[in-house]
Amino acid sequence: MNQFLDVRFSYLLRQSVTNKEGQHPVVLRVSFRSERRDIFTGIHASEKTWDKKIGRLVVFTKKEGEVNKNLELILRKANHCFDELRFSAEPFSIDELVDKIKGKEKKPQTLIEYLEEGNEKVRKRVGVEIVKATYYKYRKSLQYMQEFLLSQYKLKNYLLIRINVQFLDNYFRYLRVEKNISHNVALKYLSFLKVILGPAIRSGIIKDDPFRELKLKAKPVYREFLTSEEITLIETLHLESKELERKRDIFLFACYTGLAYMDIKQLSQKHFIKDADGSYYILKPRQKTGQESIIPLLPKAEKILRKYSLTGDLIDFNWYVSTNQKMNLGLKEIGEKSTISKTLHMHLARHTFATTVTLANGVPIESVSKMLGHASIRQTQHYAKVVASKIKLDMLRVKEIYK
């Protein structure tokens, strides 16, 4: 018999069960907090060779001595299992103790398996709540984590319970230095990790929410945009290629509507609403967030749509939107032909609409926010800062005149 605090281990014969040789199974009785369980040891003994007082076989031959040694090893393992649970500082039940002694305890949850399960859940949301591109970012995050573990720890996996703020900080530094990823994008990969690990944090598998302790903030980003003069350069540029002309028109349409690439690709007649005065506006939920965009059509945007209509009706437009990659390659070529130093890409058009086309012309930030489909004005405010810097630059010219 052995006793540690409120646990007790003892051996006894299960006399209600007999094998062919007339022997009874020896069981290890676990008594813990007023409960008890019996564990079969796989050892059998007869009543005449069993000593009830000491819970061991009476040693007549070498064979009984070997059996007692095995019983001692089992008891030692039981004590060790109890100590591991006791010093883990986590509450546990008698059934968890028994499972541990029998080798049936739950395997420790590991980071990569948890991320793989989480990624699968994200994949199932594609087309329902998120776009495929978002899922690809989560999948890339998993790949970076696997590479990080191999590079920094020489491991293929890592226990969830070991994740702390130092681990997260090391991962962030790895993304910045080894992968040459920008500060804000590296933070985005940390946010993907936080989403997947959220349930593990809430359930207590990962203690003390290490993300809360991570003192990393996004850096201010300058949102480049085109000036009115640069838009005119692109509009008046002579292009011999019909394909480049189409890509330019789609880009300019984005400049005059603020629609993101994917929303332009999805645009159809159902998204156009005709007002009582005969004007049109676009009413469309953003593919990325589901937030509704309300965008009155500017005359230049209408003109582009009519160019691609066989009937002259602007909502009867029919154009082919290339992949985002091919669009951006074409726009880069257009930018070089127009001698604009900025790199043209589809998202630059959205920034241009927010700054040069709307805010710089006095459109209230609340209206711009609604047209861009932002969930809050906070998302639009960084464009207002850009406009403020533009005004400052514009006033430098005035200062030269009024010295």
Image: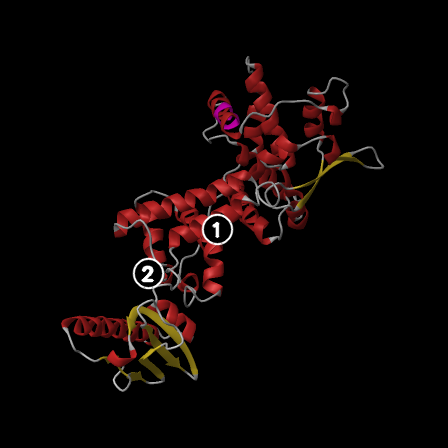
| Placement of 379 over or under 99, stated as above or below | above
Crowdedness near tag 2: few (<14), some (14–19) or many (≥20) residues, C-alpha within 10 Å: few
Farthest-out residue, left? 62
Residue occupying image coordinates x 25% and y 73%: 71
* 114 or 212: nearer the viewer: 114
Farthest-out residue, front? 21
The residue tagged 2 is 166
Circle number at residue 118? 1
Q: Are marks 2 and 1 in contact (CB under 8 Å)?
A: no
* 46 or 396: nearer the viewer: 46
Residue type at the position of mark 2: Gln
Q: Is residue 321 visible?
A: yes
| Placement of 226 over or under 105, stated as above or below | above
**Percent from the top left, x then y, of residue 381?**
57, 51
Residue 194 placement, left or right of 65: right
SS at circle 1: helix
Q: Is residue 328 magenta?
A: yes
Residue occupying image coordinates x 52% and y 42%: 134
Residue type at the position of mark 1: Gly
SS at circle 2: helix
Number of numbered callouts drawn: 2
Mark 2 vs 1, N-terminal side? 1
Which of label 2 and label 1 is nearer to you? Answer: 1
Q: Is residue 281 magenta?
A: no
**Percent from the top left, x then y, of residue 203?**
48, 65
Helix, strand or loop: magenta stretch = helix
**Percent from the top left, x then y, of residue 274?**
80, 34
**Percent from the top left, x then y, of residue 248?**
57, 24
Residue occupying image coordinates x 60% and y 21%: 246
Q: CA distance from mark 2 to mark 1?
A: 23 Å
Quadrant of the rendering where the N terminus is positioned:
bottom left
Segment colored magenta: 327-331
